[in-house]
Image: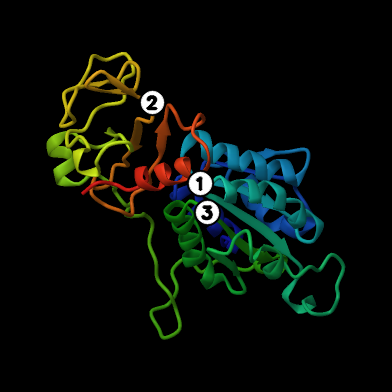
């Protein structure tokens, strides 16, 4: 039985993380990886695209539709450069994507060799969360683990650069227990964001609170009102009930067209750091200083 190569180890590690599809375009800078994917037929599907740029866009789309890490692969030099458009699409849309690119042999680096590009500088912006060059087989395990884990946790683009001579070296699947080695495992502990206890108890998460800038700030309704334009009037602590079907405050028969709504996030309703969104039926009709002052007053979240 032949000894697995570094490329075989990398492909197997991707499979252990749940990767079942890799998008890319072949090239001599990733011949070792292409051979490993061919030997791993039935475990990971290689989707050959018409262009490296398309491979990156497909990896981003894969992440969007599946929630998994999208993986794209390209050769060194121009192939790696072509990935950038799709990778920036993933970065700006906060999608987890791993880019694996080849590089010239380690002995040729720094010699202005054919298609030699400073890939670390090229990808340092789009893959700034994690970008590493694998120079020895013992790096593969923790480099793949960290690249996938950070991509999932930070919902960002990560990158691995693998010189073509490293791809053909014998694999080191378990680094020795000695100084200067790193040991890692598979899996991620995801963050869970939930509403605060007070919001869950009173059903306030994701609801809206009415606020009329023409009235005293102390008279803001203390009960949360769900956003339902067709619902019946809601009782509140204003002098008159609030008619949510017309989004107007009926103040003893006097219509107030400046009624505003504050949309609370799932965070604690009294948090001044929560995102806010103001809606006002009379905002477009107001102008000048009056509109500015009204917006300033209505942008405050009542205690």
Spot occupied by residue 223 in the image (x, y as percentages of width and height)? 17, 33
Image: 41 above or below 100: above
Spot occupied by residue 301 in the image (x, y as percentages of width and height)? 29, 47
* Distance in Å between CA atoms under marks 1 and 2: 49 Å
Residue 69 is marked as 1
Mark 2 residue element: loop
Mark 3 residue element: loop
* Distance in Å between CA atoms under marks 3 and 2: 44 Å
Q: Quadrant of residue 208?
A: top left
Spot occupied by residue 114 in the image (x, y as percentages of width and height)? 87, 67
According to the picture, the residue beneath numbered tag 3 turns out to be 156
Residue at point 78%, 68% (across, down): 117
Q: Residue 95 or 107: which is nearer the viewer?
A: 95
Spot occupied by residue 65 in the image (x, y as percentages of width and height)? 51, 33
Residue at point 25%, 44% (across, down): 194
**Mark toward the start of the polypeptide (3 vs 1):** 1
Residue 53 appears anywhere in the view? yes
Residue 54 is marked as none
């Amino acid at each position: 039985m032949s000894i697995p190569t570094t490329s075989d180890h990398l492909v197997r590690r991707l499979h252990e993380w749940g990767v079942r599809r890799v998008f890319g375009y072949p090239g001599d800078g990733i011949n070792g990886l292409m051979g490993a994917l061919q030997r791993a037929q039935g475990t990971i599907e290689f989707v050959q695209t018409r262009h490296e740029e398309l491979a990156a866009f497909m990896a981003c789309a894969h992440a969007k539709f599946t929630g998994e890490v999208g993986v794209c692969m390209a050769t060194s030099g121009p192939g790696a450069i072509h990935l950038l458009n799709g990778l920036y699409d993933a970065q700006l849309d906060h999608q987890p994507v791993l880019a694996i690119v080849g590089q010239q042999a380690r002995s040729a680096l720094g010699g202005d060799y054919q298609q030699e590009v400073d890939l670390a500088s090229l990808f340092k912006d789009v893959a700034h969360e994690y970008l590493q060059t694998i120079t020895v087989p013992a790096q593969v395990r923790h480099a793949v683990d960290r690249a996938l884990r950070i991509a999932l946790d930070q919902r960002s683009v990560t990158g691995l650069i693998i010189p073509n001579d490293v791809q053909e070296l014998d694999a080191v699947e378990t680094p020795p227990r000695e100084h200067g080695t790193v040991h890692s495992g598979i899996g991620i502990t995801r963050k869970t964001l939930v509403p605060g206890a007070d919001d869950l108890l009173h059903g306030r998460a994701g609801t809206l609170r009415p606020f009329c800038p023409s009235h005293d700030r102390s008279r803001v309704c203390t009960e949360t009102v769900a956003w339902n334009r067709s619902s019946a009037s809601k009782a509140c602590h204003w002098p008159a009930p609030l008619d949510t079907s017309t989004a107007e405050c009926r103040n003893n028969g006097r219509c107030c067209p400046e009624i505003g709504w504050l949309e609370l996030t799932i965070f604690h309703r009294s948090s001044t750091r929560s995102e806010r969104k103001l809606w006002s039926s009379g905002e477009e009709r107001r102008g000048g200083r009056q509109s500015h002052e009204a917006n300033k007053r209505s942008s405050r979240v009542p205690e």
